[in-house]
Amino acid sequence: MAGPPDPSALRRAYGVPDAVRLRDDGQEVLAWVDGAEEPVRAVASRPDRLPPARVSGRAPLSRIESAIGPLFVREYRKGGLLRAVRGRRFRGRFRPLDELSLARRLLAVRVPVLECVGAVVLRAATGWRGFLLSKEVRGAVDLQTFLYAPDAHPEWPVTDALAAAGVAVRALHDAGVSHADLHPKNLLLDAATAGVRVLDLDRARAFDAPLSEAQRLDNLVRLARSVEKHRLKGLAVGRRAALRFLRAYGGGPEAGDRWLDLVRARLRPGLPWHVFWWRLSGQVRPPRPRGGLPAFDDGGGAP
């Protein structure tokens, strides 16, 4: 017969920082930082009755008020083209607890990530459901939305936004974290700090040392591929935009130019197959506005 849950074992297994409170009663796993216990318990008690948040272009979110300010609540959902039928039940590791623990550790060393304050895991025979609570960043806009309409945000010069994004991604990589889904939507321009926060650390891989060059390149190519997909939808960015980002990432013009050469060499061979799949699956519909080389390899686009 199994004994009672052991929160200390769970804390060790997930590397939960000491500053995060942890409760496990066998049915629910709740984790929170100071000030977030009440909203965490509220999410656990009514997971299907949370007020929706209107955040354009993002996965469904809820928004609740708390003593520490407005919080967004994100439920973990399965992705891919079959997301509607794959449900929101998971097995295996508790991803909300992994993400909360990683975010808190990165915040402690001043890596600019979203301030996650709580996690909820609801167990059932069919698998667990999970929720992550994070502080709302007022007046923020993600990089993808910004690049489609930079004139709507005159407080952010395009060159400054791209440079801030490069600095944020470099900080993440220097901290030994490889993002599982690095794309412009997961880079948030924060007007309050004039910087960029990295969003969505779900399934990120954390290492004990800064990322190797090969690991960094894998992440940067993922980002470049996402940019290419949006170029097919009309996003006006090109080589100068890529250089602005990569020079900030690399710490100077020479390093940025080198990273651009590495990224485009890795990106170019497989890009036609990705374009074919995006069009076949309906992810992009308009034809490419002009021929030639990819955004990370041409001479046009935004500065």
Image (tube, rainbow, N blue to C red):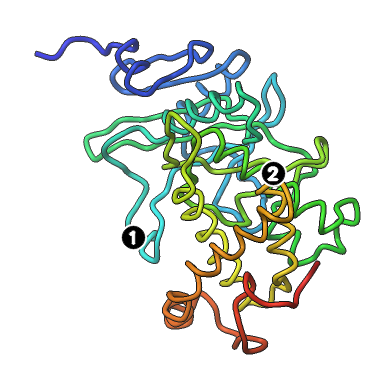
The label on residue 45 is: none
| Residue denoted by label 1 | 85
In this view, 270 is above or below 110: below
Spatial CA span between label 1 and label 2:
38 Å
| Residue denoted by label 2 | 167
Does residue 178 appear to the left or right of 260 in the view shown?
A: left
| Residue occupying the far right of the picture | 154
Q: Secondary structure at mark 1?
A: helix
Q: Nearer the viewer, mark 1 or mark 2?
A: 2
Does residue 66 appear to the left or right of 182 in the view shown?
A: right
Assign the N terminus to one quadrant of the image: top left
In this view, 266 is above or below 99: below
Q: Which quarter of the picture shows residue 196?
A: top right
Whichever of labels 1 and 2 marks the residue nearer the N terminus, that label is: 1
Q: Residue 245's spot in the image, x, y percent?
A: 70, 56
Does residue 131 appear to the left or right of 14 in the view shown?
A: right
Assign the C terminus to one quadrant of the image: bottom right
| Residue occupying the far left of the picture | 1
Q: Are marks 1 and 2 in contact (CB under 8 Å)?
A: no
Q: Nearer the viewer, residue 48 or 97?
A: 97
Q: Nearer the viewer, residue 173 or 122?
A: 173
Does residue 160 appear to the left or right of 255 in the view shown?
A: right
Q: Secondary structure at mark 2?
A: helix
Q: Residue 116's spot in the image, x, y percent?
A: 58, 29
* Residue drawn where x is 28% and y is 11% of the image: 6
Q: Nearer the viewer, residue 231 or 23?
A: 231
In this view, 183 is above or below 197: below
* Residue drawn where x is 42% and y is 33% of the image: 207
What amino acid is at disc 2?
Answer: Val
